[in-house]
Amino acid sequence: MAGTTSMRPSSQRRKLWRSLSRNPRAVLGTLVLAVLVVSAVFADQLSPYPPNRQNLRNSLSPPSAEHLLGTDQFGRDVFSRIIHGGRVSLQVGFISVGIALLVGGLMGLLAGYYGGRLDSVLMWIVDVLLALPAFLLALAIVAALGASLVNVMIAVGIAFIPVFARVTRAAVLTVREQDYVAAAQAAGSSDLRIMFKHVVPNALSPVIVQVTLALAGAILSAAGLSFLGLGAQPPTAEWGSMLSTARPFIRDAHWAVTFPGLAIVITVLALNMVGDGLRDALDPRRKDA
């Protein structure tokens, strides 16, 4: 039994990578994400200008050899600000999803494993949070806490907790009924050991898919909050904030709005492509086909 259990995750990983490598959309999404992550990590080295350097004599200049994507109303290089904005957006996405995964995943794990009254109470909390759409809930939380990037991370993280709680609970309910869990219980293993050695590793597949999809939603929500003036504050380079400040010049200098918007679209699309690829790879019906 122990040998079978230990081999199972390794076998699943091999099948997962083989399936993903055969999915052109998933491969393309992964490559795009890799480029975005590398550019965010090495933003200081890749950007030709400091993101906040102003040159009012060169404001709203169209794309050229000197400024690949043009300049904004303050003469700041749009390309440099997009690269640094990617760092901020990815940071917000990962931290907010990390909050949601930690809290929501723990709630789903406890609710699914123990059931009973604890399950009812935790799912009641989830239902309360689901009463509002995720963006409206995040908007209300940021409005209450105050406009800042940290509060956006907290708000978006809280807004995505119910999704992870439900996905984790559903996966745990399935794994809890497996023979290897019953064998561990019969052997006298503690609940904590069973949950983190047997249940969690075998319930990760749908959670991993949800992480990629939630990252797309978190980045989009954070950009929306910054666009409304509740997220990153000037002069911080952030995609949603760039859209907001350049909006009055959309007719005369469309590049100041177009390229930050394209950055959001490409990032969200790449994450969704990876998420769809993971979901297809982990779909039992697709495996049997």
Image: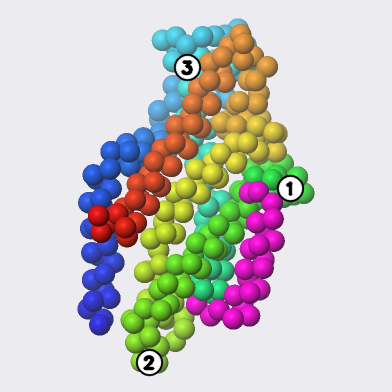
Q: Residues within 10 Å of mark 3 (few under 14, many from 20)?
A: many
Give, as a three-letter code, the residue at label 3. Answer: Leu
For residue 69, the mark is: 3
Question: Which quadrant of the rendered structure holds the C terminus?
Answer: bottom left
Q: Residues within 10 Å of mark 2 (few under 14, many from 20)?
A: few
User: Mark 2 to mark 1: distance in Å?
Assistant: 48 Å
Q: Which residues are magenta?
A: 113-134
For residue 186, the mark is: 2
What residue do we see at 39% from left, 46% from top?
276
Q: Are marks 2 and 1 in contact (CB under 8 Å)?
A: no
Q: Does residue 12 show up magenta in the picture?
A: no
Residue 251, horizontal then vertical, whole percent: 62, 11
For residue 140, the mark is: 1
Nearer the observer, disc 1 or disc 3? 1
In the image shown, does 280 or 255 lie closer to the viewer? Answer: 280
The vertical placement of 190 against 50, above or below, is: below
Asked if residue 239 lies left or right of residue 124, the reply is: left
Q: At numbered mark 1, what does the secondary structure look like: helix, strand or loop?
A: helix
Q: Work out whether mark 2 precedes mark 1 in sequence or the reverse, and give the earlier one.
A: 1
Spot the residue most to the right. 144
What residue do we see at 63% from left, 53% from top?
159
Q: Is residue 42 visible?
A: no
